[in-house]
Image (spheres, rainbow, N blue to C red):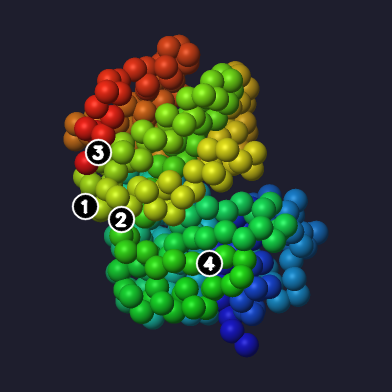
């Protein structure tokens, strides 16, 4: 029987474990911090708000217990990932493959998760990343979608895609490890902007946001050595429906509630990512008017209407002059 492990029992992580167990034929060993509300709910109820654990999904409260398998999916908050890597480095990981299913950048330096893991773990491991659209709520209704898996090792991409492919999720081969991670992280930021437009009931500007944002994100990708056109792929533009429009999007909902002066109270990865992006954009003089205006509204408490309107007050007569 095939086996894999999962670290992180939040909404997305638990679904990936369930998907691997029910669509891909794996026995899945799952770990989270034993005091985590997500873990406690799954331990006590064998289900959460979205799904029920199948018999071939086993919960563990010790990290060592899930490091016995060759493939490990990780889905935790990006700002906690370095700490996890330091803990992981205390175990023998040689030869193992890690699939990182998080969409965010580490602040303050806007580090991609792949680089964080390489910095902390010097063992002979294989790393891949998963990006692209999809919500647990839709998948549980058998609504199909596509995603991308990328790595700096072609055989790792090939093996993961072939083992995880199904009629529910079609995986594409990524060709820009840096760009796909940055694109996936920044779509959360753009999701916050979309939510603010929803909260202000300025729906007509969402089209302009969708047209302008990939150009801006492409600049950021290019600065880090990726291909700016990756912003138009599944990891970024391809995820807009799920992030800019869906009622299930945490980032969009955060933005909508923020515009209305309400507290969201759940993790929205784009909030921390926005802070990291703003710092790098200022330091390196990267032209990112959407992110910079959004930062003023979210972190500096600038007047939300005038600040958000400023995102679109640029000369559109030369719209494509801004492409990298």
Q: Which of the 4 image quadrants contains residue 34?
A: bottom right
How far separated are the C-alphas under marks 2 and 1? 7 Å
Residue 35 visible to an observer of this rendering:
no
How far separated are the C-alphas under marks 3 and 1? 16 Å
Closer to the eye: label 3 or 2? 3
Q: Are marks 3 and 2 in contact (CB under 8 Å)?
A: no
How far separated are the C-alphas under marks 3 and 2? 19 Å
Name the residue rendered at 68%, 52% in the picture: 137
Q: Are marks 2 and 4 in contact (CB under 8 Å)?
A: no
Q: Nearer the viewer, residue 305 or 299?
A: 305
Image x and y of residue 195, in percent: 55, 30
* Helix, strand or loop under label 4: strand
Lower position in the chain sequence, tag 1 or tag 4 = 4
Image x and y of residue 319, in percent: 28, 29
The dot on residue 170 is: 4
Closer to the eye: label 1 or 4? 4
Residue identified by numbered label 1? 225
* Helix, strand or loop under label 2: helix
Residue identified by numbered label 3? 323
Name the residue rendered at 57%, 59% in the picture: 145
Residue identified by numbered label 2? 178
Badge 4: few (under 14), some or many (20 or more) residues near its Cα, within 10 Å?
A: some
Image x and y of residue 271, in percent: 46, 35
Lower position in the chain sequence, tag 2 or tag 1 = 2
């Amino acid at each position: 029987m095939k086996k894999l492990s999962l670290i992180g029992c939040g909404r997305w992580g638990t679904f990936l474990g369930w998907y691997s167990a029910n669509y891909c034929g794996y026995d899945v060993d799952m770990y989270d911090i034993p005091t985590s509300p997500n873990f406690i709910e799954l331990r006590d109820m064998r289900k959460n708000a979205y799904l029920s654990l199948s018999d071939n999904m086993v919960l563990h409260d010790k990290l060592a217990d899930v490091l016995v398998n060759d493939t490990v999916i990780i889905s935790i908050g990006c700002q906690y990932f370095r700490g996890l890597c330091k803990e992981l480095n205390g175990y023998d990981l040689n030869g193992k493959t890690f699939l990182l299913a998080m969409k965010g950048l580490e602040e303050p330096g806007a580090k991609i998760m792949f680089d964080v893991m390489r910095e902390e773990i010097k063992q002979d491991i294989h790393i891949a990343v998963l990006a692209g659209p999809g919500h647990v709520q839709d998948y549980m209704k058998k609504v199909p979608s596509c995603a991308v898996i990328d790595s700096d090792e072609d055989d790792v991409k090939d093996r993961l895609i072939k083992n995880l492919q199904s009629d529910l999720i079609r995986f594409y081969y990524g060709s820009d490890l840096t760009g796909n991670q940055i694109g996936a992280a920044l779509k959360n930021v753009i999701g916050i902007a979309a939510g603010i437009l929803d909260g202000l009931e300025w729906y007509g500007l969402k089209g302009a946001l969708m047209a302008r944002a990939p150009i801006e994100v492409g600049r950021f990708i290019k600065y880090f050595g990726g291909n700016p056109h990756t912003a138009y792929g599944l990891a970024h533009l391809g995820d807009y429906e799920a992030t800019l429009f869906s009622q299930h999007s945490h980032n969009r909902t955060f933005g909508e509630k923020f515009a209305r002066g309400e507290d969201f109270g759940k993790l929205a990865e784009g909030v921390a990512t926005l802070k990291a992006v703003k710092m790098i954009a200022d330091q390196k003089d990267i032209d990112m008017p959407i992110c910079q205006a959004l930062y003023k509204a979210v972190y500096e408490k600038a007047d939300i209407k005038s600040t958000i309107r400023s995102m679109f007050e640029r000369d559109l007569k030369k719209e494509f002059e801004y492409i990298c």
